[in-house]
Image (cartoon, grey):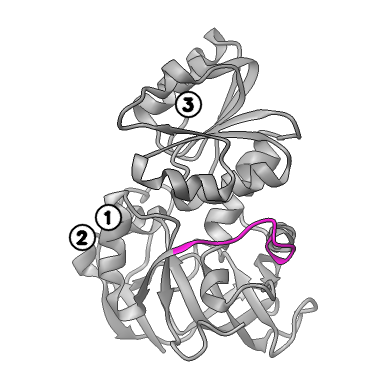
Amino acid sequence: MFAMVIDRYGPPEVLHGASIKVTSLGPFDVLIKNYATSVNPVDWKVRQGFLQARLSLKFPAILGWDAAGVIEQVGAGVSRFQVGDKVFTRPAIDRPGTYAEYVVVNENLVAEKPTSLNFLEAACVPLAGLTAWEALVEHAHIRSGQRILIHGGAGGVGGFAIQLAKAMGLYVLTTTRKVNTEYVTALGADDVIDYESQAFERVVEDVDVVLDTIGGTVQEKSFGVLRPGGILVSIAQPPDQKQAEEHHVKAVWFFLEPDGKKLQALGQLFAEGKMKPTVGNVFALRDIQAAHVLSQSGHSVGKIGIVIDPEMAYQH
């Protein structure tokens, strides 16, 4: 199969096309003919070698952790899916990734593709959508009537988090650049802070939850806008527990643990029209170097979609 691979850690230029053998199926694996994938910040962090302590690659390595396509083969023990099913998934990070024409995934990490989404849209949901789900539902335990501050609302995780919080009845504040104000407002944000002209810590107060997608000084200043008993959930870096104690709040950091059943529940919100993916930029698989450059700039809006099969990516 054709795949974009890396033979070493480094800049976007280390990504190149190659012919790679498809991984053999285990008894509980499915083989997915991959029509589309997407680029997430974790992709270029792995490519540069920043996450070697957590993920040690065997070269040549295929990156990518989003996929949407059709099942072409199932293992002997597979019970949830059959050949021909339209699915999407966030695969395990310790197996070959999704910058490829085929991907082998354990059935427990797979979910039915929402019929409301085409394959490209569906491929932009799993990693970022599940990250928002775990942050808000499983760690922050959000509930209707709460106030939440979401940093980086125009990004992939931030955009899904805004929609998820609104679907669950929260008042949503978010930070973004002024140029993205209309976009995040359309997603459902109630209050938008232009971080280029406003210091969020001076205009935001008494929120129940902060979703930190930035880290650094943004994370440090976020403790001060939480009410006592509130919680900061970070996907950027582990928070300072001493600061959390001083502000009488909780603070957690997590790394996504994918799960097909959670993805199925998330997909239902898309099927019901309560959430929608925004595919801000689209690249062909062979042009994925440029997609990495855009993601690394930090100025992409929504998700960066990657078309693997041009004839099928836009089909439902």
The secondary structure type at the circle numbered 2 is loop
Circles 3 and 2 in contact, beta carbons < 8 Å? no
Q: Amino acid at mark 3?
A: Pro
Near-viewer residue (147 or 50):
147
Near-viewer residue (239 or 299):
299
Q: Amino acid at mark 2?
A: Pro
Horizontally, is 264 left or right of 66 in the view? right
Considering only order in the chain, which callout, 1 or 3, is on the residue closer to the N terminus?
Answer: 1
Considering only order in the chain, which callout, 2 or 3, is on the residue closer to the N terminus?
Answer: 2
Residue holding disc 3: 239
Residue holding disc 1: 48
In magenta stretch: residue 276? yes
Q: CA distance from mark 2 to mark 1?
A: 6 Å
Q: Looking at the rendered structure, which numbered label has been put on residue 11?
A: 2
Q: Is residue 160 above or below residue 76?
A: above
Q: Is residue 57 above or below residue 212?
A: below
Q: Residue at x 56, y 12 (%)?
A: 245
Q: What are the residue bounds of the magenta stretch?
A: 270-279
The C terminus - image quarter: bottom right
Near-viewer residue (304 or 18):
304
Q: Looking at the rendered structure, which numbered label has been put on residue 285?
A: none
Q: Residues within 10 Å of mark 1 (few under 14, many from 20)?
A: some
